[in-house]
Image: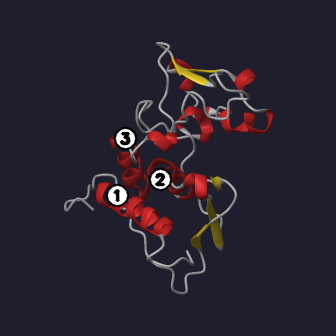
Amino acid sequence: MALSSADRSTKKILKVMADIESQTCLRFVARRRQKNYVSITRGDGCNSIVGRAGGAQEVSLGTHCLYQGTIAHELMHAAGFDHEHSRSDRDEYIDVFTKNVEPENVEQFEKLAPWKNRLLTPFDMDSIMLYGSATFARKPGLVTMLAKDGGRLKEVYQKRGLSASDAYVLDLTYVLDALPMASTPTNGC
């Protein structure tokens, strides 16, 4: 990130990183000479590919993306996490209305094949990786997703950060995957 540490955008991003570090064992380090790294840019949108790309991996955070929830969402993509609403078991918990989605964003609502995702926790309605009910609606007033009980889903930008389940899965992925099966972290990390 080639931004001044006094820059307001940088402060927001660093705060979200600090929040993630306080909830998990994941640590963000400033790039020195690492070949593979995350490059946060001021792009036109809010996006990142899912998982390690190799080399410079761009996380685009345009000016309309600088909400705590949106920043955390894109950092989770960079860390390898798909959308919660893409889980293979999502139809048990939410209804997705692709006819209401902007045509260019329908792929954002595709369900993963069961062999393409690890269901380590129950479906999480509070996940930072779960879009809100109006995300990518093709016109105002339409909903793209609802909870099975008809409840609306909170928009990503309205969320404060990771849910407890998000933090748990992040640690399972980055800490426990590296430990022998019988081991658990003894110091929290």
Query: Residue 57 is drawn in which quadrant?
Result: bottom right
Q: Which tag, 2 or 3, sits closer to the chain's start?
A: 2
Q: Where is residue 165 in the image (x, y as percent from the top left)?
A: 37, 41
Q: Position of residue 107 (x, y in %)?
A: 73, 37
Mark nearer the viewer, 1 or 3: 1
Q: Is residue 149 visible?
A: yes
Asked which secondary structure carries label 2, the reply is: helix
Q: Which amino acid does label 2 sit on?
A: Ala
List the residue tagged with mark 1. 19
Above-or-below relation of 64 to 39: above
What residue lies at 66% left-to-right and 33% top-to-bottom?
Answer: 109
Q: What residue type is labelled 3?
A: Ser
Q: How far apart are marks 2 and 1 (CA)?
A: 9 Å
Query: Residue 49 is drawn in which quadrant?
Result: bottom right
User: On the picture, is 141 further left or further right than 120?
Assistant: right
Asked which secondary structure carries label 1, the reply is: helix
Name the outermost residue toward the top. Answer: 149
Q: Position of residue 164 (x, y in %)?
A: 33, 42
Q: Which amino acid does label 1 sit on?
A: Asp
Above-or-below relation of 129 to 184: above
Label 3 Cα crowd, 10 Å radius (few <14 / some 14-19 / many 20+):
some
Q: Is residue 129 visible?
A: no
Name the outermost residue toward the right. Answer: 103
Asked which secondary structure carries label 3, the reply is: helix
List the residue tagged with mark 2. 72
Above-or-below relation of 34 to 127: below
